[in-house]
């Protein structure tokens, strides 16, 4: 998995759990998760910052996997997962499981 | 003969309900349970698990094993696995389940995002002065078709019940403003805040 793929997957997983989160909260939680991952075996995630997360979220938005609304102009954007995003997440999970099971067998 | 059948069905019902609830976001389980889509999804999943249990009855004789295996076959089907039961592929059924599930999450996520946006808007409005809120309140209510005299008497009533407490008056006016004309408040909050605001959008 590349750096962006990992961030987008983590963002989708977090949004599936929380359904919707403001950008500031979403970035904070993702950075915390990434920090925890770094300590194990994901060196490609070193040096990830809020800008990388914003870029990954923009990509997810373009693909219609997440949607963003705001409480008026100038406010913090609120991100929520879409049905398409959920299906993508399930598909990625299924692929990952098949891959892992294949390796095990 | 009838008793094991009842126990099998009951076990499938409880196991299916447990697994379906486990899939949902914990903080919003109650919200999901109150939607028609959840019960539609659960009903179809339960029916599918019962059919799976019925089809494997020849291979598995114990009622509790039938319930267990039937339920997990149901889960495999709704997880988009190309599984064949009794020689028939259940992939089209899996697509239907996934579509219902996607719509269920979509609706829940949109609902929560709107609730968060509303809370953020109220927080921003609370930082404005009473005079700004009073004027915004009047404009929003007039735009929504309220009578000017009725608006004035409403503000007077709120002022007298708050007894000179500006924060209390602001809260009452904001509550009404957001309830009656949320879209207007959302579109104009930036103007009411003035020019010196930070742009967080991207």
Image (cartoon, coloured by chain):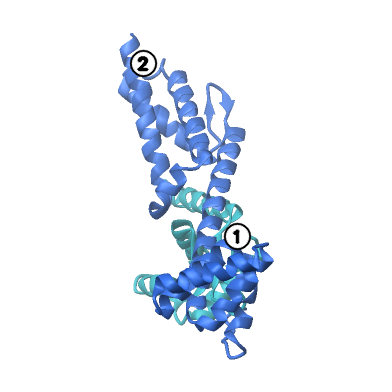
Chain colours: A cyan, B blue
- The residue that disc 1 covers is A65
- From this viewpoint, is residue A22 visible? no
Do the residues indicated by labels 1 and 2 lie within the same chain of the protein? no
> Where residue B13 appears, x then y in whole percent?
38, 29
**Nearer to me, B83 or A68:** A68
Task: Please name the residue shown 51% across and 37% down the image.
Answer: B41
Using the image, tell me which numbered label, if any, was put on residue B106. Answer: none
| View extreme (bottom): residue | B196
> Where residue A11 appears, x then y in whole percent?
50, 65
| View extreme (top): residue | B1
Alpha-carbon span between mark 1 and mark 2: 43 Å
Q: Secondary structure at mark 2?
A: helix
Q: Quadrant of the C terminus of chain A?
A: top left
Quarter residue B18 falls in = top left
Task: Please name the residue shown 45% across and 32% down the image.
Answer: B73
Quarter residue B193 falls in = bottom right
Q: Residues within 10 Å of mark 2 (few under 14, many from 20)?
A: some
- From this viewpoint, is residue A17 visible? yes
Task: Please name the residue shown 57% across and 41% down the image.
Answer: B100
Q: Chain of mark 2?
A: B
Q: Chain of mark 1?
A: A
Q: Secondary structure at mark 1?
A: loop
> Where residue A51 appears, x then y in whole percent?
54, 81
Q: Residues within 10 Å of mark 1 (few under 14, many from 20)?
A: many
For the residues labelled 1 and 2, say whether their Cβ atoms are less than 8 Å apart.
no
- The residue that disc 2 covers is B5
**Nearer to me, A40 or B10:** B10
> Where residue B187 appears, x then y in whole percent?
65, 73
């Amino acid at each position: 998995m590349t750096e962006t793929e990992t961030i987008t997957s983590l963002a989708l997983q977090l949004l599936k759990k929380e359904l919707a989160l403001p950008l500031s909260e979403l970035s904070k939680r993702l950075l915390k998760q990434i920090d925890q991952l770094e300590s194990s075996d994901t060196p490609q995630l070193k040096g990830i910052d809020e800008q990388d997360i914003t870029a990954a979220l923009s990509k997810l938005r373009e693909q219609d996997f997440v949607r963003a609304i705001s409480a008026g102009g100038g406010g913090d954007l609120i991100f929520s997962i879409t049905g398409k995003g959920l299906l993508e997440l399930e598909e990625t999970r299924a692929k990952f499981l098949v891959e892992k099971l294949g390796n095990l067998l | 003969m009838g008793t094991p059948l009842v126990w099998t069905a009951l076990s499938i019902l409880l196991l299916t309900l447990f697994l379906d609830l486990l899939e949902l976001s914990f903080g919003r389980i109650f919200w999901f349970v109150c939607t028609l889509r959840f019960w539609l999804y659960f009903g179809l999943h339960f029916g599918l698990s019962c059919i799976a249990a019925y089809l494997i009855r020849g291979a598995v004789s114990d009622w509790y094993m039938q319930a267990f295996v039937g339920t997990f076959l149901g889960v495999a089907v709704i997880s988009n696995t190309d599984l064949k039961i009794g020689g028939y592929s259940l992939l089209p059924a899996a697509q239907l389940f996934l579509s219902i599930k996607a719509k269920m999450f979509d609706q829940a996520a949109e609902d929560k995002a709107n609730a968060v946006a509303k809370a953020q808007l109220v927080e921003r409005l609370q930082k404005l002065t009473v005079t700004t809120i009073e004027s915004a309140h009047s404009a929003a209510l007039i735009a929504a078709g309220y009578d000017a005299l009725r608006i004035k008497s409403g503000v007077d009533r709120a002022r007298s019940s708050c007894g000179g407490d500006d924060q209390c008056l602001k809260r009452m006016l904001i509550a009404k403003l957001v309830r009656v004309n949320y879209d207007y408040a959302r579109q104009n909050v930036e103007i009411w805040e003035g020019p010196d605001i930070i742009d967080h959008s991207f």
